Amino acid sequence: MSSVRVGMVGYKFMGKAHSNAYRSVPMFFPKVKKPEMAVICGRDEAAVREAKEQFGWQESVTDWKELVQREDIDLIDINAPSNAHKEIALAAAKAGKHIFCEKPLALSLADSREMQAAAEVAGIKHMIGFNYRFSPAVQLAKDLIESGRLGKIYHFRATFLQDWILDPEFPLVWRLQKEIAGSGSHGDLGAHLIDMARFLVGEFKEVVGMSETFIKERPIASAMTGLTATKGNADTEKGPVTVDDATLFLARFENGTIGSFEATRFAAGHRSTNSFEVNGSKGSVRFDFERMNELEVYFTSDEEDVQGFRRVLATDGAHKYAEAWWPAGHPIGFDQTFTHEMVEFMNAIEEDRQPVPNFSDGVACQAVLEAVEKSVQERRWVELTEMEDINQ
Amino acid sequence: MSSVRVGMVGYKFMGKAHSNAYRSVPMFFPKVKKPEMAVICGRDEAAVREAKEQFGWQESVTDWKELVQREDIDLIDINAPSNAHKEIALAAAKAGKHIFCEKPLALSLADSREMQAAAEVAGIKHMIGFNYRFSPAVQLAKDLIESGRLGKIYHFRATFLQDWILDPEFPLVWRLQKEIAGSGSHGDLGAHLIDMARFLVGEFKEVVGMSETFIKERPIASAMTGLTATKGNADTEKGPVTVDDATLFLARFENGTIGSFEATRFAAGHRSTNSFEVNGSKGSVRFDFERMNELEVYFTSDEEDVQGFRRVLATDGAHKYAEAWWPAGHPIGFDQTFTHEMVEFMNAIEEDRQPVPNFSDGVACQAVLEAVEKSVQERRWVELTEMEDINQ
Amino acid sequence: MSSVRVGMVGYKFMGKAHSNAYRSVPMFFPKVKKPEMAVICGRDEAAVREAKEQFGWQESVTDWKELVQREDIDLIDINAPSNAHKEIALAAAKAGKHIFCEKPLALSLADSREMQAAAEVAGIKHMIGFNYRFSPAVQLAKDLIESGRLGKIYHFRATFLQDWILDPEFPLVWRLQKEIAGSGSHGDLGAHLIDMARFLVGEFKEVVGMSETFIKERPIASAMTGLTATKGNADTEKGPVTVDDATLFLARFENGTIGSFEATRFAAGHRSTNSFEVNGSKGSVRFDFERMNELEVYFTSDEEDVQGFRRVLATDGAHKYAEAWWPAGHPIGFDQTFTHEMVEFMNAIEEDRQPVPNFSDGVACQAVLEAVEKSVQERRWVELTEMEDINQ
Amino acid sequence: MSSVRVGMVGYKFMGKAHSNAYRSVPMFFPKVKKPEMAVICGRDEAAVREAKEQFGWQESVTDWKELVQREDIDLIDINAPSNAHKEIALAAAKAGKHIFCEKPLALSLADSREMQAAAEVAGIKHMIGFNYRFSPAVQLAKDLIESGRLGKIYHFRATFLQDWILDPEFPLVWRLQKEIAGSGSHGDLGAHLIDMARFLVGEFKEVVGMSETFIKERPIASAMTGLTATKGNADTEKGPVTVDDATLFLARFENGTIGSFEATRFAAGHRSTNSFEVNGSKGSVRFDFERMNELEVYFTSDEEDVQGFRRVLATDGAHKYAEAWWPAGHPIGFDQTFTHEMVEFMNAIEEDRQPVPNFSDGVACQAVLEAVEKSVQERRWVELTEMEDINQ
């Protein structure tokens, strides 16, 4: 079984997470096709060389256009800034490389569709980085739903609550600027909720939403890296926040399930509460990523006097991916979700099938995001069918 | 200090809860004006006589019209079926009696306003039974918000989740028939969430919602009492469910807070999850009535390395009403919320002021309920100002 | 069915709890034999008269010796200070009255045995106030064990943690003086754990323990009532604390179960954590009185991928006593444990059998308490058989 | 800054965990001295060669005696079976290599002391693998105690509860045989509790304990690897279990703290509940490794109405080691505890100081383990001073 030689564009937060995942696949999943950490690419030559050393890549380069053309590369991993995704992906697809692209696929639905079309024409394998699907506890939720053990699904409700910009003096980082980030909590956090809903429940039918920007202006950031930035003071000049601080929406799914969604960066005390609950005719499940090793599970079929939500630790052999790691009851962390994601990609390549989630999931997520935005602007319900006309 | 002689119309679930509250006031709050359990009234003479004995009233009668005219009665407590509230309240107000009315005030906003107007003209004291406000933990939440310790409020989110009609063979009880119950989970459960939001955050500005009836027909109930009923079988004739099984809505408040609400009877595993969370610029609070003695509290001002939600037990002298009961750490239950409610009414009468919540809160709640219903029907945002034209 | 006329000696914390229980039996358990609140007795004539009014007794008296002789009294309820229990109980038994006695039965094992013997000779019904048994969630634990659903029991571990005397300036109240209180946290809190263990697991075989008094002297209390007292200051004279602040012990039971026990008043943050866990060959249960409506339950027979502790709300018809109160999911409180206790006593009288727990349980608990004390003093394991020689 | 070339003896569960840690240090702690994964050693040539490939070592060998003599090796990592620790360590020390040794240091206190003495004579750096200390949440607990924010410590209570041998048909693996494993749950699980107590509270003064073997015989295992084994059936021959299934003990510390300890493999529903609680005069902390990213923290100095245990997520920059990983609120797992451990060892080497915990901690832990065993055998309290005579 030959290995898959990876060329990765990007080397910050996600570049580190992906690197860690690639190197962990052969160690913890030795029977899976091996990703080879061939080339890392970034614009700053010194920085990317340092990343190469630190993360364990064989080679570093600065020109992604050359990289995607190299014959010794099988897969292009795109975790450069979001507004660069499309151009790189189109070139990589044209060059016949498999593609792993971080979310969001692109900054617009039209662009996303263009990328999907290009990938399909090229006949490559493509995947999108909705890593939360790959928590063993989430996989258990999926299995309980698909196998019918929760019955017909009535409710889905999900929140992604953070508090890192609660302080009005927190500066105007790029994530708060629409031209760079596309949207605020909606695209950053809400996108994960939408993907989780599609994964667990199915396709959206219609949505109605609301958005709010609580702090309208912030100190202009003097310097920023990743998620951090130097805090402003009274004298710092201010600029307008052009994205949403919070976006909420209600939804109806094709299968009749109804849903509630909330993404915010203004929930004091919530560092990263990425949570969902599903209620079906035969049971319920509940998940919170802050306790990612646990799934709460309820069955209506339990005996009457002992019915209650069970706290299931998804850490033993009965749970997907778990056996590769530690003994029962020993937690795994955020990084493992990426490793599992890469296992899925390697398996898909080996088995000559599309991995899941792939670019079609990125497109579908983008369609819901934009339907919600349209709903917010037009103050009305928007059906997903309305988004079908938006093309490349 | 003279006592207040109560005449109570109704003797089922709420009649029992109120009776227990009246008899508990003098025992646990000996310094509070005493409610005297004078007369209990119901249509079934034998049944109401039995209730009189069981609950400890001095006298039982069957004609509420006579009761409201009696000179020896100071206060009329209305917990008869909802569709009887208005007629009794109007008569009691006219007779100059103080009124305690269970929620909902009436089946429509117009009727509610008529009742409020009548109460105001009569110059009586009036109160409505939103008992959940009177949990000490909820009082703590209120105090933290009002005193500014949570800062400016950004988010309110609340759910009231139950599962008692999840079984499709559960029969068509009166609570599932619009002509008797007015609405389903929305009016029954959502009303409590709306009142809680108004209590903690303030007035609603606009809403957008959705409703669903998952099980469209059910076996016609052969017999029913209160919340229970004989379950149907395959041969039982079915009739249409005419109320909502679930209603969700988003809201904007006058003060800029945004909110999310969900009331459902289809959340498997949730016996009665009446919960809310409030996020402000300086902290957050979280409450779930299933753990009614607890309030989770977060402050942004805590030292950096020990920030986290605190589980506060609202059972000691630092918490409103708590000192009247048991030592710190000893739980109180659902029944105490009613006792505290009656303490507030007695204090208001003694101090010659309106108790809170009163009929105006019943009207305001009804306005939000109907605005949501209008939004569901017309599939659009509805401003509360639109409800102002609805008059008696 | 005639009622049972009660004469109660004592009117403080426990007097109030018992009064509330007696008046609640007929209201919430109308089919149960009715306790009639006939006479309340205390030394301070004015205070006991006030208690009579407040709690709803028919008559107040000051001489318990006369009271126990009255022909119109069927049952004597003893909740006077612990050091008065024995004398009153012996007199009441001699007079042929049924007896409800608060825990501890007496200040010594010998005295306890004397009381039990007297009660048996008199042929009366006798009960001891281990109220925690009567939480519906605890009853569920008992049922799961007795029915074999937890299999063979291996482990019992229990803690009763409080923090009300953590402050060294908290004064030297009577509960900290051996001559009045008998012992400290051991007799006050540990006694409840011992009774719970006996209820759920069975008889003790041997124990080894340790005790500690962390704060050796405290300001002499200027005034004290029940659990509260005026705090001392720098100038207040100090006196020695003569009871244990904390007592821990290990135990072996007759049936092979092993156990761990801890009672302390020095566990910061614990208002009243009265908790236990039982592990058997087929499952486990966990309880904490601060969340008294819940029992956590685990079964080894659950399917492999969904094993986990269930949070069972013992608030619906499937749970003992629960149906008498509120709908599913609506909490009850500390007070209900007393009501259920009195229901058991009334039923036992009606059915002409001894109620459980009775004086023999008080004696058995006292034997374990004293075995632990002996173990602490002699720094060795003490078998319960060693306590058999201690007689009246 | 030169790197540290590691030679590792052992390649199973702990070999994998250590390998993952060594390779993670340079990636996530780039400023720390780098461990170089030079040589992996095991008896089975094919298996160790495979491990070399899988884990990323430069070379594999089969003779540890040669390995410890190699000049190109700076550090010997010993995670071979426990009964081989001593011989390897003595040789490595003699050869002047730094040593990382998994717990237990050796199978007896005498052996442990011999190892410590040899290491001291050799002047090498030595460390023992008590990895749980290195959870950021545990580091926070340590910091709160050391800085005095919890005040004087009164109580320490800890449990390590598992359930993997609950089934009587689970076979007689090596961990259940005294000659190989030394002891059962006591040495395997209890050792971690003892080390945690010493880390947080200080030195032990005296102990009293009890042990139990619930299942006296088990099917002889046909094949076993690491923690798993083929389950027996009715026909399988049985052999005696020669270690403890559960060991509990009480303790007094030098500083006056009192403690309770329980280690068992018979706690149904507990996969790996490694938990502790510390109560001090100014506050408390609580930890459970199943939720290793959280520390519950209580302060008596909080305002009266909002006192309660805080759920602190130790995942942001205010917490030791956390910044190296993911953004706030994103969990880390079991593997990171080993990475942090190796960071400490590398830092100690760079700074020319002994790392903590080192062989002296291994010895001290062994002394407590054996004191408890002595107490169990002799059914009495054993002072730690009694263990001082036990020498190499």
Image (cartoon, coloured by chain):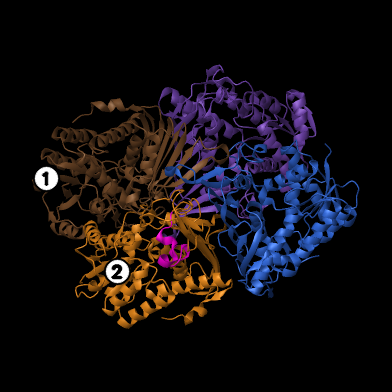
Chain colours: A brown, B purple, C blue, D orange
Task: For residue C328, say whether it is visible.
Answer: yes
In front here: C42 or B346? C42
Label 1 secondary element: helix
Left-right relation of C219 to B177: right
Left-right relation of B178 to C107: left
Categorize mark 1 by other alpha carbons within 10 Å: few (<14), some (14-19), many (20+).
many
Categorize mark 2 by other alpha carbons within 10 Å: few (<14), some (14-19), many (20+).
many
Question: At label 1, which amino acid type do we have?
Answer: Val
Using the numbered discs, state the Cα–Cα distance from disc 2 to disc 1 in whole angstroms: 42 Å
Which residue is at 30% across, 41% downward?
A187
In front here: C77 or C361? C361
Q: Which mark is residue D181?
A: none
Q: Which residue is mark 2?
A: D77
Host chain of mark 1: A
**C2 drawn magenta:** no
Picture layout, residue B107 above or below residue D335: above
Tell me which corner region of the image, top left, top right, bottom left or bottom right, holds residue B6. Answer: top right
Residue C352 point in image, percent of width and height = 80, 43
Picture layout, residue B99 above or below residue B310: above
- Majority SS type along the magenta span: helix
Task: For residue C171, say whether it is visible.
Answer: no
Residue B146 point in image, percent of width and height = 53, 48
Do the dots labelled 2 and 1 sit on one chain? no
What segment is highlighted magenta in the picture?
Answer: D171-188
Question: At label 2, which amino acid type do we have?
Answer: Asp
Tell me which corner region of the image, top left, top right, bottom left or bottom right, holds residue A195. Answer: top left
Quadrant position of the N terminus of chain C in the picture? top right
Q: Which residue is mark 1?
A: A68
Residue B308 point in image, percent of width and height = 45, 55
Picture layout, residue D164 above or below residue C370: above
Host chain of mark 2: D
